[in-house]
Amino acid sequence: MYIVPNQRGKLAVVTGANSGTGKEAARRLAAAGAEVVLAVRTPEKGEAAAAEIRAAHPDAALQVRRIDLADLASVAAFADGLVAEGRPIDLLLANAGVMTPPERLTTADGFELQFGSNHLGHFALVQRLLPLVLAAPAPRVVTMSSTAANFGRIDFADLQWERRRYRPLGTYAQSKLANLLTARHLDRIARERGWNLVSNAAHPGYTRTNLQTAGAALGSGRPTWMSRVTSIPFLPSQEVETGAEPLLLAATDPAARSGAYYGPTGMLEMVGPAGEASVPRRARDLDAARRLWAVSEELTGTRLPASV
């Protein structure tokens, strides 16, 4: 098991911290001494997760704050609250996600739900919080991607899947490739501007969480092909304690590199100890990364800070 180094004195923000890899990451960061902001869509679920963490670690320093990544106004309000307090953010873990709703759904701003939540919501959050992140002595931004990024494709002519027939897994794969492209591009921006920032990415392999089944039932309330596929017993899978370790390693290991990608190192990169993962060919496309960054700024109305 990966042992999280001492995080005392650090402030960490974890999206999707009420369940799955987000809750596990929040638990272990808090146990290592960090103060953790549980950024969640449903505060009641966040408070329940915080109570569970405190039951195991009574001294855990936790805050529960609401953010809906499918609503850019909510993202702005969440970020504005932290900016108003002015405390530097040492660790920003862009972990939350929605996976394969069977029907095409949209965010509050009219974006396709998976691209809008998984990518654009986190993109806007990172942009808005960068001044606080860059104010920390050794900050890190870690973006959760997925092995689905391996077969993702960014179609700039139809990012919202309005022209093509909606495909749940294809849309999810696009959003996860977008996560990986922008995480690596933020690393390039940081190096160009001389920022002391680590921006990397992680994926959990096949970790048993509620993401596959909860996301797959969105819009229908019934099990779908995704929930049936993920219940096949011979697929290699692992518990959330192991699945969260690539995210934790990327966020806290002194040897973790900016621009790198971390995931399970076992069979098919679906299970096993955390380590460096292979970066898909399309995630190494510099032109696509630059174009996606520019489009994402336009869609979210956000910009990089002019100065640090």
Image: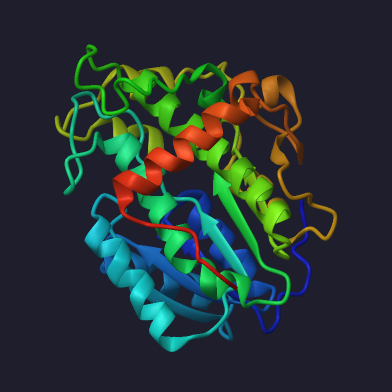
Placement of the C terminus among the 4 image quadrants: bottom right
Q: Residue placed farthest to the right in the image?
A: 255
The quarter of the picture where residue 170 lies is top left
Q: Looking at the picture, tell me which residue is in the foreground, 228 or 302.
A: 302
Q: For residue 125, what is the image quadrant?
A: bottom left
**Residue 200 place in picture, x, y as percent:** 66, 48
Identify whether 22 is placed above or below 233: below
Q: Residue at x 50, y 39 (%)?
A: 179
Residue at x 26% of width, y 29% of height: 101
Residue 263 falls left or right of residue 257: left
Q: Position of residue 54 (x, y in %)?
A: 51, 78
Say if residue 12 shows up in the picture. Answer: no
Q: Nearer the viewer, residue 146 or 109?
A: 109
Question: Is 162 situated above or below 199?
Answer: above
User: Which residue is more in the foreground, 229 or 22?
Assistant: 22
* Residue 171 visible in the shown view: yes
Give x and y (percent) for residue 64. Answer: 38, 74
Instruction: State the residue at coordinates (39%, 43%).
Output: 296
The percent coordinates of residue 273 (x first, y second) are 76, 39
Q: Residue at x 32, y 35 (%)?
A: 114
Q: Please tell me whether residue 201 is drawn above or below residue 160 in the rendered image.
A: below
Residue at the extreme front of the image, as rendered: 306
Q: Nearer the viewer, residue 104 or 138?
A: 138
Q: Is residue 153 left or right of residue 180?
A: left
70 versus 288 height, above or below: below
Numbered-mark total = 0
